Amino acid sequence: MQIDAALERIKTVVGPRGWIADSGECEPYLVEARHLWRGATRLVTHPAATAEVAAVVRICAEARLPIVPQGGNTGLLKREEITHYKSPVEIELMHTIKRALDPDNIMNPGKVVSV
């Protein structure tokens, strides 16, 4: 499958409000918060339903296109950054809650809050 054909299929699946191709509008999705890493893409999608996500993944798999999911922009990058805007008491409270809810540290181990 050609890349352009795959991208058009994805646009059809997510509808006119579910994709961004303008390089300027894609920019916020390509640079992480500290501006240390920058990605590149021809299309950002915003699937509105699980079925749309599944269809986009299927199209990308068929076309052998990479997918980079974006979550809440947390994880390893926020582990150090959080100390600049949360107090030690707040951070310890987050650790306490994490230990109570996830004593085996299986949910996002080593990310923002670890056991």
Image: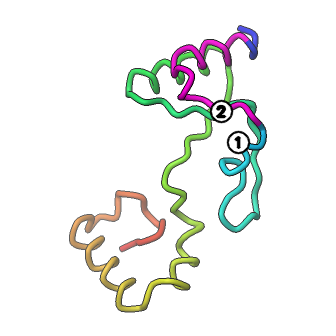
Give the magenta part as a residue range.
Answer: 5-22
Front in this rendered view, residue 57 or 104: 57
Query: What secondary structure is found at the residue carrying circle 1?
Result: helix
Q: Which mark is residue 26?
A: 1
Percent x, y for residue 74?
Answer: 51, 62
Res. 19 image quadrant: top right
Q: Which residue is mark 2?
A: 20
The amino acid at mark 1 is Cys
Residue for point 65% across, 64% down: 33
Do the numbered discs 2 and 1 sit on residues whose CB atoms are within 8 Å?
yes
Q: Quadrant of the N terminus?
A: top right
Residue for point 41% across, 91% down: 88
Query: What secondary structure is found at the residue carrying circle 2?
Result: strand
Q: Is residue 99 left or right of residue 45?
A: left
Residue for point 74% across, 36% down: 41
Q: Is residue 47 above or below residue 11?
A: below
Tell me the CA gap for discs 2 and 1: 6 Å
The amino acid at mark 2 is Ile
Q: Is residue 77 left or right of residue 37?
A: left
Front in this rendered view, residue 19 or 3: 19
Residue for point 71% across, 48% down: 30
Residue 78 is covered by the magenta coloring: no
Q: Is residue 1 above or below residue 115?
A: above
Q: Quadrant of the C terminus?
A: bottom left
Q: Is residue 93 above or below residue 23?
A: below
Q: Mark 2 or mark 1, which has the lower sequence index?
A: 2
Percent x, y for residue 65?
Answer: 68, 24
